[in-house]
Image (tube, rainbow, N blue to C red):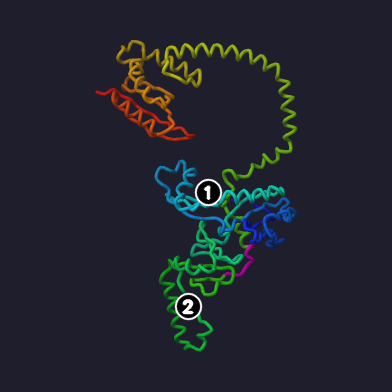
C-alpha cells in the first residue's frame, strides 16, 4: 500500500535538451495543485530545491525514451530470471544489452513484462538530482501513470505526442503521424461521425449510417475503447470516448503517487532510510570504535596467544588427516575433519579390502587425474547401497562431461543436475560398480 503523503513533487524527466522538464506539486489533502511549471532542461533542477523540501519526489520517464515489451520465459530460467532477461531480448534490440537497465515489471505464467532504458540516461538524471541534494523516491514510465481501464486504453497528449496505456504494465508513446496506423493494428473500430460536408445530407441516411456503425461496435465487444483526457486527434480512426479534460501533469502525478512500478532497482535502488540518518553520526561512530579498540586491546593479546596454540593443534590434526586421507584437498571445518576420519575408520573396520572406501579411491584416482579441472568438494560412501557419491565443482559444463566419459569405463555413472553460480559449475556424481 502506498504510504499517505500530504504533498509530493512530480517531475517529467527528459534527456533531450529541446524538450522542457515539466513539474507539479500536488496536495492529496486539499485535492489541488500547489504549484506547477517547466524547466528549460534537467540542468535547472536547482529551481525545484525549494519545492522539493521534505516532499517525496517522483520522476516520470517519457515512454518515448524507453521501451515496454514482453518476452517469453524459457523453461528452467525462472531461478535466474533477472540475470537471463537481458539476453532473452538481445536479438530484438539494436544495441548492446549491457548498456540497458532491464526492469522486470510483471510475470504471468511464462510471459514477462519488462521495461528497458539506457544506463546513461538513468545515471544522467540521478547525477543531476544528487548534485542539488534531491532524491527520487520512484521513477516510473509516464504512460503507466494514466488511469487504468478494464474495457480499453487511456490516452492523453503531451508535448505533441500521445501517451497510451494499454494495461497495468504496458503502454506506448505515439507520434500523431502514425497513431492512426497503430490504432488500426489494435482492431479499434472506426465510428462514423457527421462532418461539415454532410450537413445537407438526408437525415435518415445519416442516422442509418451512424446506427450501423454503433451496431458494428456493439457486435464486437473485443474491440478497443480509447478513453481520452485531451482533445481527440483529428483524422484518426478508433472508438474514442471523452473524459473530463484535465491538466496532463496533474493526471500523471495522481497516477505516479499510486503506482507500484519503480525503475529504481539493482544498482539504482535508493539507500535505506536508516543509512541516511546514520550518515551524520559517522564521525562519532569512528571515534567510539577507536575508544573501544583501545579498551579491548589487552584482551586481544591474550586471544592471540590462545589462537596461536589452537592453530598449532589444528595444523597438526590437518597434517595427520591429509596423510591418512590424501584425496581430501579441502578441510572446511574441524567437525568436517573429525566426521571424515570417523567415517574412514568405520569403512575400514572389518569390511574387507574389496568393500572398503580405500579400494574405491584407488580405482577413482586415475580417472580424476584425467580431469584435473574438476575439484572434489565432498565424498559420501554408502556401503549398503554399494555407491560412492561425489560433490564436485568445475569451471565449465564440459569438464563434468569429460569426467563422466572417463568414469564410465569402470563405473556405472549417474550424474545429477548441474548448476552454475559465480563462474563455477557444481553438481553431484553417483558411482556404482559395474555388474
Q: 228 or 74, which lies in front?
A: 74
Q: Position of residue 94 (x, y in %)?
A: 49, 53
Q: Position of residue 10 (x, y in %)?
A: 66, 57
Q: Is residue 27 above or below residue 264?
A: below
For the record, the magenta segment spans 243-249
* Disc number placed over residue 12 in the picture, else none: none
- Please indicate whether residue 12 sits to the left or right of residue 81 in the image: right
Instruction: Specify whether residue 203 is in view.
Output: yes
Q: Position of residue 197 (x, y in %)?
A: 51, 85
Residue drawn 32% across and 12% down?
351
Disc 1 is placed on an element classified as strand
Q: Circle 1 sits on which residue?
A: 102
Q: Circle 2 sits on which residue?
A: 192
Residue 291 appears in which quarter of the rendering?
Answer: top right
Query: Looking at the image, which residue sits at the far left?
Result: 435
Q: Position of residue 311 (x, y in %)?
A: 56, 14
Q: Main secondary structure of the magenta part?
A: loop
Disc 2 is placed on an element classified as loop
Amino acid at each position: 500500500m502506498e504510504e499517505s503523503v500530504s504533498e509530493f513533487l512530480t517531475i517529467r524527466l527528459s534527456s533531450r535538451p529541446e524538450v522542457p522538464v515539466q513539474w507539479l506539486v500536488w496536495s492529496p489533502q486539499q485535492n489541488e495543485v500547489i504549484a506547477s511549471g517547466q524547466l528549460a532542461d534537467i540542468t535547472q533542477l536547482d529551481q525545484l530545491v525549494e519545492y522539493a523540501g521534505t516532499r517525496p519526489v517522483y520522476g516520470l520517464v517519457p515512454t518515448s525514451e524507453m521501451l515496454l515489451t514482453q518476452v517469453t520465459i524459457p523453461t528452467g530460467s525462472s531461478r535466474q530470471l533477472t540475470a537471463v532477461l537481458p539476453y532473452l531480448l538481445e536479438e530484438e534490440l539494436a544495441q548492446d544489452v549491457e548498456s540497458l537497465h532491464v526492469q522486470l515489471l510483471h510475470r504471468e505464467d511464462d510471459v514477462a513484462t519488462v521495461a528497458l532504458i539506457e544506463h546513461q540516461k538513468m545515471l544522467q538524471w540521478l547525477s543531476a538530482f544528487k548534485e542539488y541534494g534531491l532524491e527520487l523516491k520512484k521513477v516510473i514510465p509516464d504512460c503507466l501513470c494514466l488511469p487504468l481501464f478494464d474495457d480499453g486504453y487511456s490516452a492523453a497528449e503531451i508535448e505533441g505526442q500521445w501517451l497510451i496505456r494499454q494495461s497495468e504494465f504496458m503502454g506506448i508513446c505515439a507520434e500523431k503521424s502514425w497513431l492512426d496506423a497503430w490504432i488500426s493494428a489494435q482492431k479499434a473500430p472506426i465510428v462514423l461521425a457527421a462532418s461539415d460536408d454532410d450537413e445537407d445530407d438526408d437525415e435518415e441516411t445519416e442516422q442509418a449510417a451512424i446506427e450501423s456503425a454503433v451496431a458494428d461496435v456493439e457486435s464486437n465487444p473485443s474491440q478497443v475503447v480509447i478513453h481520452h483526457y485531451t482533445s481527440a486527434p483529428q483524422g484518426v480512426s478508433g472508438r474514442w470516448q471523452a473524459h473530463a479534460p484535465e491538466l496532463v501533469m496533474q493526471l500523471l502525478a495522481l497516477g505516479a503517487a499510486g503506482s507500484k512500478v519503480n525503475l529504481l532497482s539493482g544498482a539504482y535502488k535508493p539507500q535505506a532510510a536508516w543509512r541516511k540518518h546514520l550518515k551524520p553520526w559517522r564521525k562519532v561512530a569512528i571515534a567510539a570504535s577507536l575508544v573501544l579498540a583501545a579498551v579491548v586491546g589487552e584482551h586481544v593479546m591474550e586471544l592471540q596467544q590462545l589462537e596461536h596454540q589452537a592453530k598449532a593443534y589444528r595444523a597438526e590434526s590437518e597434517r595427520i588427516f591429509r596423510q591418512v586421507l590424501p584425496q581430501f584437498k579441502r578441510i572446511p571445518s574441524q567437525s568436517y575433519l573429525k566426521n571424515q576420519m570417523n567415517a574412514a575408520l568405520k569403512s575400514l573396520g572389518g569390511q574387507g579390502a574389496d568393500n572398503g572406501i580405500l579400494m574405491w579411491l584407488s580405482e577413482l584416482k586415475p580417472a580424476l587425474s584425467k580431469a584435473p579441472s574438476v575439484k572434489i568438494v565432498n565424498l559420501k560412501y554408502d556401503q549398503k547401497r554399494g555407491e560412492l557419491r561425489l560433490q564436485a565443482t568445475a569451471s565449465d559444463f564440459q569438464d563434468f562431461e569429460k569426467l563422466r566419459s572417463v568414469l564410465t569405463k569402470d563405473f556405472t555413472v549417474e550424474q545429477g543436475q548441474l548448476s552454475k553460480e559465480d563462474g563455477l559449475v557444481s553438481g553431484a556424481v553417483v558411482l556404482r560398480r559395474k555388474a
